Structure formats: structure tokens, C-alpha cells
Amino acid sequence: MMPDFRNKEVPPGKPLVTIGLSSYNYAHYILDSLNSLISQTYPLIELIIIDDCSTDNSVEIINTWIKENNINCTFIIHKQNRGISKTLNEMVKLSKGKYFVMFASDDIMLPERVERQVDILETVNDGSYGLCYAHPLRMDEEGSLIGKEKYSSFNIFLEGDVMEAFLKKEFWFVPPACMLLKSAIVKTGYYNEEVLLEDYNFFVRFLLFYKVKFCSYPCIIYRERKGKSQIVKQWEKNNGERYFYDRIISNVSAWRLAKISIVKSLLEKKIYQYLKCLAVYNSSLFYKSVWVLLRNNYLKIPMKFFFIKSAKSLGILPKSEIVYEDSSWF
């Protein structure tokens, strides 16, 4: 039997859970994150840590923690920064657990997190449920609690088939608070390494195949950072063009796999809006998006978008304001 990363005695009959912790320049937070893993009440956990070429002393802190606590884990140090999607895929492929948890090195895991989510998923152990999610607590950069995670503000705790609700933005997953069936990640096709942000792209495909369960225990304390992420800044610097392109890639990949008409219709609506935005912006990514759509046998591309793009290029149409479908970047 695979040993627990803390070298604990393992009771029989427990499924192995893999925690994949990604590290990148969070030296001032990572020790709290690592110690919260030791405190887990669940007795059979595999730990994989990958540092994605940090420029601070994160690696030194991790090595010291492993030695001082007699930790039995896999620790990989990237020589070059590969990004979160490639790092996640590497961890999933290395993992031996039935369940997989992705975790960030600036968050804190509550003690009963793994045990509670395993219990929930094991009660519906028929392969149709691929994920258990929670609405975590939040803390600021200094570690002071500031309440429930913002995505629970709708007070919606859905279970089962949630694809339609997800596309309508009625609720959202906080990835570090999710436990996933590893085989479900594999069937979904892993994380897309082309897009800037992996969350939406993964879930919009994942939910075509799997149902979800909700855990009322908050599971983690999620650290909210001041200001906007580098990814959002990059999107805004380019007038959101890369955001629209990424969303087109994500939605058409799900559209190609979807079998339910209302889901396909919702995906087509999103593709329409994002492609229109690229045309109005006179973006160089417009034709690249068209090529992606055609390559996926998506033929519902309005001809008027080509005229808008041409008119913009010639300066015939004035600059227009874009109304985003999403109320936020995410």
C-alpha cells in the first residue's frame, strides 16, 4: 500500500488522495500552507510539490520543511517557468491517488478537508460524480479572515448536473476547494495548456461528463490578493482580446462534445458574443478564432462579423464600446 506522506499508520480500506501543491514566489506564505497539510485528519495522502522556477527562497523553505518534518513526498523544481496548466498536468500524471486536490502555496487547508470530501464522494462511488466542491473562507494578505468566498454570495449550493447553471454564471467553483476524481480529469483531457487561465476551460469540458457534490465544510481559507492578477492585467492591456480568444477556444471545445441542445445553444451564444467583440475591436485574433472554429466544424459564423472587421480596418466604423457578457473577468 502507498504510504502516507507523513509516514502515518494507514488503516485498511481507505482510498489514496493526492494533493498537488504548486509553488511560485510565495515564500512568505508557503510554510503556513505546508503545515496545514500535515494537520489533515485523513490518514492516506500522497503529496506532490512542484516549484515553478520561483525567484524567491521558496525552494529553500520547502526543502527545510521536508527534512525537519520527515516528509515522504515528491518534490520537483522547474528550471524554467512553465505556467499553471503544464504544472497541473504534470502533477496529475504523476499522481497515484483515486482523488486529486490541486492546492496553492498561499492558501490554508482546514484540518478535516480531505476526510470530509472523501466521505462525500465515496457515498456516491458510481463514477458519475467527478467532483466535490466547497465555498471556502477568505482571508486578506495579512491572514485576517474576511468572510465567505465571494462565489457563495448567491447562496446557491447546487449538486448533480450543473452544466447549464455553470454556463449561466449562477455559481462558480473555487479550484483549490475542489476534490476531483483523477480518472475524471484524464477523461476530460487534462488542463488546456494554450489558454492563459485554466479554470473555465477545464470545467466547461468536465461538466459535460460528470455530476458534482457540495461540501458544507469550507475546506480551505483562500487568500485574496490586493489588485489584479498578471493574467487579468494582460487581458486588459490587450483590450480583452486574449480573454475573448481564450473563451472561444474553451466554448468551442465544449460545443464539439456537448450532446444536450440547450447546452449547445448556450455555448453558441457565448461564442457569438466573443467573436463579435474581436470583430468590433478589429483584433488580429479574429481570423485566428475563425480558424479555430472551422477546425472544430463550427460553421455558425455570421458573415456580418467579417464586414465589421473590414470596416474597422478601413476606419469606416467608429470605435464602439464593448458590453461584456460576464460581469467580471471570471
Image (tube, rainbow, N blue to C red):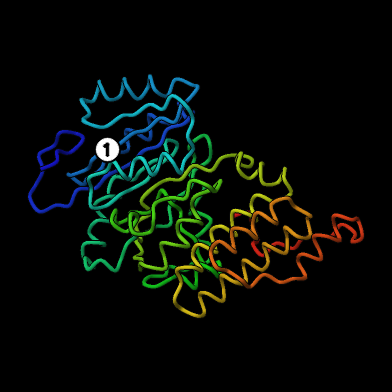
Q: How many marks?
A: 1
Q: Position of residue 41 (x, y in %)?
A: 22, 45
Judging by the rendered image, the residue that carries numbered circle 1 is 47
Q: Nearer the viewer, residue 254 or 172?
A: 254
Residue 46, image quadrant = top left
**Number of other residues with Cα within 10 Å of mark 1, as a class: few under 14, some 14 to 19, many 20 or more:** many
Q: Position of residue 116 (x, y in %)?
A: 26, 55
What residue lies at 50% left-to-right and 56% top-to-bottom?
201
Q: Which amino acid type is shown beneath numbered disc 1?
A: Leu
Q: Secondary structure at mark 1?
A: strand
- Residue farthest bottom in this picture: 261
Q: Nearer the viewer, residue 320 or 117?
A: 320
What residue lies at 7% left-to-right and 50% top-to-bottom?
12
- Residue farthest left in this picture: 12
Q: Position of residue 122 (x, y in %)?
A: 21, 62
Residue 301, image quadrant = bottom right
Q: With respect to residue 45, does 219 lie above or below?
A: below
Q: With respect to residue 57, does 22 lie above or below?
A: below
What residue lies at 72% left-to-right and 45% top-to-bottom?
238
In this picture, residue 302 sits left or right of residue 28: right
Q: Nearer the viewer, residue 299 or 225?
A: 299
In this picture, residue 68 sits left or right of residue 162: left
